[in-house]
Image (tube, rainbow, N blue to C red):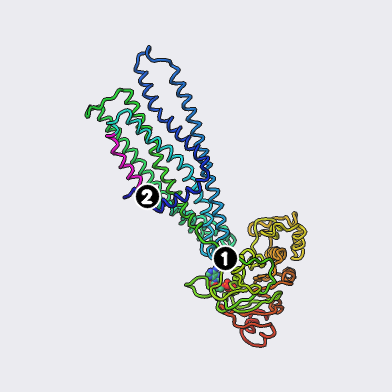
Amino acid sequence: MILRPNPDVVRVYRRLLAYVAPYWYVIVPAVAAIVIYAGISLTVPLFLRDIIDQLVQDELNRGSPFRLPVLIAVVFALRGAMDFLTVYGLTWVGRSAIRDLREELFDSYLRLPVKYHDRSSTGALISKLTFNTEQVAEAVSNAVAVVVRDSLLVFGMLGMMIYFNLRLTLLIAVVGPVIALLVGVMSRAFRRHSARIQESMGDVTRQTEQTLRGNRIVKIFAGETQEQAQFVRINAKNFRLHLRVAAVRAFGDSLIQYIVALGVAVIVFFVFSGWLSIELTAATFMGYIGALAMLLAPLKRLVNINVALQRGIAAADSLFEVLDEPGEPDRGDTPLARAQGNVEYRGVGFGYDELKGSVLDDIGFEAPSGSTIAVVGRSGSGKSTLVGLLPRFYDVDSGGILLDGTDIREYRLADLRRQISFVSQDVVLFDDSIAGNIAYGALRECSRADIERAAEAAHVTEFAAELPDGLDARVGERGVLLSGGQRQRVAIARALLKDAPVLILDEATSALDTESERRVQDALKRLMQGRTTLVIAHRLSTVEDADRIIVMKDGRIVEQGTHRELIGHSGWYSMLHGMQFVD
Ligand SMILES: Nc1ncnc2c1ncn2[C@@H]1O[C@H](COP(=O)(O)OP(=O)(O)OP(=O)(O)O)[C@@H](O)[C@H]1O
Ligand SMILES: [Mg+2]
């Protein structure tokens, strides 16, 4: 049967209701207002009948000229007030539910593992948060108002018609099932298309975001035509999908109106022909037609709201899917205030996904507290992967990583991450002031003096002093207003301020001029002091100064030792050393 509700839809709707239910104290009065509103609307055909009734009387019997007009004025003032209460109340409920849902979704984005973010497009995730939630909001507020009010109106008007003339109403009631069938078929089409429209909005956002982010590359490599062509394709698909929904909607609309018009034709026929001996006074007939006419608008709205409803259900479904994704595994319960910083990798194996096979194999080394371990190796040999396992961006597949002799999975995740500072190859800055970027996140509470000290040590003060706002100067989105070396120094200041016992450093490969290079180096040296440091090294000086060097090849450690030991071996290290550093 077409009309049987899809269990999935029921499940999504139930879950959506859970977001609305806490606001019952607004829903109840709003729905009461709807009922009053609908009740008042039901009096319209009665008014019509009474007016005609009085008009056909001769003047003497018409009664007071004030009664009906005053009644109309009062009744409709009340109806207006009820309408306001409904619309405002239900919008309030819908927006509240959406605010909650959005917060929950944003929260999800924060706790989803790196792996999830790796395989989903940022644009699609943004679009879910902005576009899909709006569609749910619409379904919740508009749809509730329309469904409750207009179903009441439809049934009320039907009741009114039965009251005016039962036999006539039964006669045209046969169109009911036809309309219901039609609505059922249309709903399914709406829902299917809505899900695709939402995906297509995700594509629009993704494409836009990528193009904007890469705007410099687009300009230099003349990527405009390519980007434009891709966007045109995506946008055209969006257009087609919308039109398909519009077509179904418009067709359904006209069909339903036509079916009702046929109903009127049937009525007129029976009344005029006198068949089935249906007899009506002129006044009752006006009332009857009035009720029928008034049935049309709510019926049309009911069918149309179906579009919004199905859209909302499809959108909610996609949001719930994200909410149901498991967050980062955080099952450890060992607290850790401040680690000493003894790090050990023991037979670590890891792969990003099963199909692509392992990226790290049997990695084992020790980094005693305060030592510096340099990781070197060709591009793609697994260096970034290796250091990324320590803060548990990903979890190892086999073996284990120990911090102070305890497997890192046994610590509480927040405690573990508090022990680790991180300066990445591509520095990440937020659209905030320099000071705000240094004292980011958990460092928010640091005193101004501490921030200034970190800025001084990382040679940030030098360039900040030349900016009009000093440390309060804004860095722009992703730090674009600063130079590469300046961004690095801000990141180093941030890591300094965190003062964690373990430091992960992905040295920048880009060469700075000697002067900036010296400053960055100097800042880094200070940062590494007294910390266990895992550094992916590109600079000769870093490598030479390290307590231990790990040489990676194809996800394995092929050699390890001090610079002196390794250079004597004439193995991989001396070869790499020759290739990378000699000049
Ligand atoms: N997020 C990821 N998802 C899937 N595979 C990845 C991911 N990151 C890296 N890889 C793969 O893992 C391998 C090791 O990458 P990794 O980034 O660790 O290399 P690397 O030694 O740091 O290289 P480079 O010196 O160029 O930075 C590569 O083959 C890469 O394709
Ligand atoms: Mg790397």
Mark 1 packing: few (<14 Cα in 10 Å), some, or many (20+)?
Answer: few
Magenta part of the chain: 170-185
Q: Is mark 1 within 8 Å of ligand 1?
A: no
Quarter of the image that includes the C terminus: bottom right
456 in magenta: no
Tag 1 residue = 331
Drawn side of residue 263 relative to residue 316, left or right: left
Q: Given the image, on which type of amino acid does mark 1 rest?
A: Arg
Which one is earlier in the sequence, the residue at label 1 or at label 2? 2
Q: Main secondary structure of the magenta part?
A: helix
Q: Secondary structure at mark 2?
A: loop
Q: Nearer the viewer, residue 306 or 392?
A: 392
440 is higher (above) or lower (below) than 380? above
Question: In the image, residue 274 lies at what x, y percent?
Answer: 23, 27
* Residue at 50% over, 70% down: 353
How far across and how far down the image is residue 390, in percent?
A: 61, 70
Residue closer to the observer: 496 or 268: 496
Camera-side mark, 1 or 2: 1
Left or right of residue 484: residue 450: right
Q: Which residue is mark 2?
A: 5
Percent coordinates x, y for residue 473 in the rendering: 72, 55
Query: Compared to 26, does 201 lie above or below?
Result: below
The span from disc 1 to disc 2 (Cα, nearest Å) is 40 Å
What residue type is disc 2 on?
Pro
Q: Secondary structure at mark 1?
A: loop
Dot 2, crowdedness within 10 Å: few (<14), some or many (≥20)?
few
Q: CB of mark 1 within 8 Å of CB of mark 2?
A: no
Residue furthest left in the image: 275
Tell me the residue at 41%/45% (across/down).
306
